[in-house]
Amino acid sequence: MTTDNELRLDPLTLEWVAIVGQRQARPNLPSEGCPFCVGGLEAPEPYTVRAFENRWPAFGPGAPIDPDGAAAHATGFRALPARGAAEVVLYSSDHTGSLATIGLDGARAVVDCWAERTEALLARPEIEYVLVFENRGELVGATISHPHGQIYAFGFLPPVPRREAEVAAEHGCSLCETVPAEVVTATRIVREGGGWVTYVPYASGYAYGTILAPRAHVAGLPELDDPGRDELAAALVDVVERYDRLFDGEMPYLMWVHPGVHLHVHFAPLLRAAGLQRFVASGELGSGTLSNPVPPELAADALRGTL
C-alpha cells in the first residue's frame, strides 16, 4: 500500500481519481496563529497578494505523463504518478477580508495573480489544464478563515472541462449564445455591467448558483486585457457582496474558474435558505443529476434585490 499521491483509473467510467494519501497528515487548524498573516509560516514578508506551493499538494512535480495511453487499457488496476502542481493564493494580508471586502484594486490584484500563475503553470510541459478555485467557509471544509483560494495544475484534461470542450466542438460555443440570450431574457440576470455578465444558469444545479462570463469570447485568464480584468474584478466583488447580504452573513461557497473554450466563473453556494445547508444526496451523486430546490428565476430575483 502506498501513501504517495497517484492517479488511479476507474474501470467503470475510465475517469481518473486522485488518491492523495499524504494529505491525510495535513493539520486541520494552525497550531500557532494564522500562517497566512504577515509574519506567519507562509507569509514572512508583507504582501498584497501572494501565491506559493501547497505543502500538502494533491499533485506534484514530475515528468510529463500520457494518461490517454493508460486509459486505453480498461481492465486491471491502472495507476500513474499524480503529476502537476498545487498552489495557494492569498487574496489579502487582512485576516478578516474576502473578495467582497478587498475592493476593486484588491480583486484586480487577485485576478492578475491568477492569470500570471496560470500562464506560468501552463508553460510547464507536464501541465495540461489549470483550475483556479476557492472553498469558502467551514461548511466546505476550509480550515483557515484567512481569505485565500487555490490552484490545481493537472497533467491531463479533467472530465468537466473536457466535456465542455467536446460540446463546443460539436455545437459551437454555448456561452457565446447563452450570454446574449440571458441579457435579452433578463429574468436570470443578476448583474450586467461592462464586459462581464453575472447570471443564474437556466439549468443551475445549485441553489443560488451563478456564472460570471465575459461577453467576448476569451479562452482564459491570461488572455484578458486590462478592461476585461477590471470588469472581472468588479463582478467578483459584486457577487460575493450579494451572497453575504442574501442571508445576512458570510455565505459559504465553492468557486471555480473554467478556462479552455469560453472563460467563465462558477459560484456554488452551500445554503439554500438562511441557516439551511443544501446537501448533495446519494440520488444525485449516484445518477450524476443534481436537483436544485430553488428555481433559477427566483434565485436571480433574490440576488438582484440584495444591493
Image: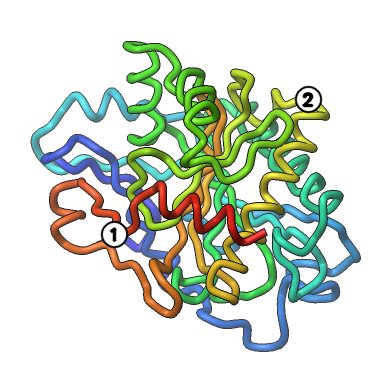
Residue 156 vertical position relative to residue 78 in the rendered view, above or below: above
Task: Kindly give the residue lying farthest to the bottom in the view shown.
Answer: 32
Residue occupying image coordinates x 45% and y 51%: 209
Residue occupying image coordinates x 33% and y 28%: 163
Residue 56 image point, x, y percent: 53, 63
Residue 301 image point, x, y percent: 50, 52
**Relative side of 171 to 199, left or right:** left
Residue 278 image point, x, y percent: 34, 67
**How far is disc 1 from disc 2 in space, using C-alphas?**
38 Å
Q: Is residue 151 visible?
A: yes
User: Which label sits in the foreground, 1 or 2?
Assistant: 1
Disc 1 residue type (three-letter): Pro
Camera-nearest residue between 127 and 205: 205
Q: Quadrant of residue 222?
A: top right
**Relative side of 6 to 185, left or right:** left
Q: Which residue is mark 1?
A: 293
Quarter of the image where the C terminus is located:
bottom right
Q: Which residue is mark 2?
A: 225
CB under 8 Å between callouts 1 and 2?
Answer: no
**Relative side of 217 to 81, left or right:** right
Q: Is residue 131 visible?
A: no
Residue occupying image coordinates x 23% and y 29%: 71
